[in-house]
Amino acid sequence: MSDIYSKIKKYVYGSPLKTGAVVIDVPASEGEPKPFEYDAAGGTFTYTMKDRDMVFGLGETVRGINKRGWRYTSNNSDDPHHEETKESLYASQNFLIIDDGAKCFGVFVDNPGTVTFDIGYTSASVLTIKAQYNDTDFYVIDGDSPLELVTTFRKLVGKSYMPPVWAFGYGQSRWGYKTAEDIREVARRYKEADIPVDMIYMDIDYMQDFKDFTVNPERFPDFENFVQEMKEQGIHLIPIIDAGVKIEDGYDVYEEGVKNGFFCAKEDGTNLVAAVWPGKVHFPDFLNPKAAEWFGRKYKVLTDAGIDGFWNDMNEPAIFYTEDHLKEVFDGIEEFKGKDIDIWEYFKFNDLVSSLSNNAEDYRRFYHNFNGVKVRHDKVHNLYGFYMTKAAGEAFKEITDNDVLLFSRASYTGMHRYGGVWTGDNFAWWSHLLLNIKMMPSLNMTGFLYSGADIGGFNANTTEDLMMRWVEFGLFTPLFRNHSALGTRDQELYRFERKKDFKNLIELRHALVPYIIRNFRDAVENDTMYIKPLSFEYRGDERAREVEDQLLVGDSIMIAPVHEQNANGRYVYLPEKMKMLRFRSYNDYDEEILEAGDHYVPAKLNEVLVFIRPGRKLELAKPARCMRDLDMEHLTEIAF
Ligand code: MIG
């Protein structure tokens, strides 16, 4: 620990709030935050990048592992269009590493409002960081290698969340399962197809009128027994919890929240009224410790029924509209009434209506009671999902003896101590499989080890080959969940023709679980990365620096997922001699020693490429019907 103070310098601007991101109190330094230059007039931190500098980090963002050449804005947003020209997704993880291949340093910007990272966007060689409200703890981290910087940063922000062992299995989700019968059918059809499944997710339709902590009694008669029935088959049910609480007389969560002042209120003291799935809602003030404790304890309704996993959604918070802004829009529409509108006015009209959702003005309308301090929401916007998840994580210690699976959509650094993340509403696009590959190391850097994307793609219709290739990559992501949106093509693995191939892949996941868990745990305990870019290990290898679609997973293997349609193989760069395994199933694979350098490697649709590093080994379990039956003691080893 003493060591850490010599590696981290903290510079304080304005009057920063304690966000909860860090767990170590670093004394403030005076002077310039070198190597950044601080411009007090503009509130900007500037660093001139050398040609060779690469920039890593920012967690869940678009584009590459090397973040150079774009502008990213930390401003948690419910935006399902994860196109490469987007600046903000659901998460804010303001940690960067700048590395020229020999020298490197890190920076962490602890500011829970909007922060912009212009990484060579305005000017190709200039990195500029600017917060909207500059109440910032600005940390500069010293170290000899990116991996050392990651570890120092992670000591600063605390140990990552460790999920229960079974959460490393395979999960099936879909927005649209409505009844116990729907879920039974999923379980039954997986069984018929002889494909293992460890978790089935319950999306918003399980609730009574989308009310948190209720279960629709017609759709799920005798819920407790149903949870048991599934457990007997080795299946954990994982319900969703949304941030907004339905406004409805007689609903305990609503009534208690109002009575105790636990909801976010506006300047005039009345509670903000927003609309999300339940209709009109109030937002719990998770930043108020009393409200957080109260909300966290509500999960007990479900943990008492045998539930031991949750996903927290809509916690940016997502807002379809607020009552206040809806009124403004209607007033605006009045002005168009009876007018013969030209195209410019038509655009204005359109903009007016589409300004209803996730409106920046709305995020300035309400306040938090943050540890006794009244703070306007937009100044702490990026903490909302973190504090919802923290509320749940802390409550679990009190309300249940079980280890609980917990992950969230919105996040901020610090939340990684309480749960994982899924990367939100991607599309069934090959480019989003690649995006998933590139996001994983950045998420790992920032401590979000338990993470993964919606496999197969959430929005739009998937295809069998995309699903297969995506599962082949998902085999290595700690969160391994097939999820899709209402109205899209069914994508449970038993829907496809090549069921046997999918069975082999899920069994391969089970076989890999001991390796995944050993390495995941190692990353938690030692504040390291479970998934890494090649350049973090192969220092001095110029080629490895630029590889964006191969990853190191754990201490022994490199993976090279096929991410293009109709490809029966791909080019792979080997930084050193490795043993290549081409898996068709856990016990059916080819072996070949490949020299360092470039290779074209065939990999048919059902084949997964794994490369073992010299002197290392991959341990495999014998797959079981479900995680509970997995024998993690008797393993076979493939060594090189
Ligand atoms: O407005 O609960 O990202 O996974 O299926 C959509 C329905 C709300 C967004 C989540 C998605 C989930 C969906 N939710």
Image (tube, rainbow, N blue to C red):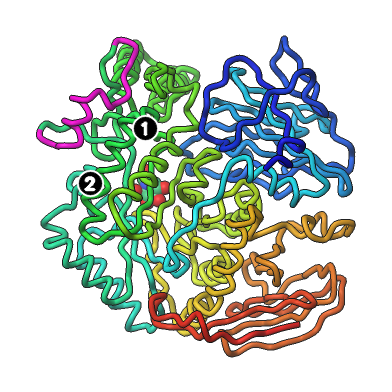
Q: Which residue is mark 1?
A: 286
- What SS does tag 1 mark? loop
Q: Please give the name of the residue rendered at 57% of the width and 44% of the height, measured from the top-left corner.
A: 158
Task: Pick the quarter of the image with the N terminus.
Answer: top right
Please state the horizontal and vertical placement of residue 393, each as a whole percent of the image. Answer: 39, 47
Q: Nearer the viewer, mark 2 or mark 1?
A: 1
- What SS does tag 2 mark? loop
Q: Please give the name of the residue rendered at 32% of the width and 42% of the height, measured from the top-left corner.
A: 242
Q: Quadrant of residue 250?
A: top left
The residue segment tinted magenta is 250-268
Please state the horizontal and vertical placement of residue 603, each as a whole percent of the image. Answer: 67, 78
Would you place residue 424 above or below residue 259 in this image?
A: below
Q: Which residue is mark 2?
A: 213
Q: Amino acid at mark 1?
A: Phe
Residue 374 located left or right of residue 278 = right
Please state the horizontal and vertical placement of residue 407, each as a whole percent of the image. Answer: 43, 51
Q: Please give the name of the residue rendered at 73% of the width and 30% of the height, measured from the top-left corner.
A: 9
Residue 35 located left or right of residue 529 = right
Along the line of sight, which residue is nearer the eye, 533 or 372?
372
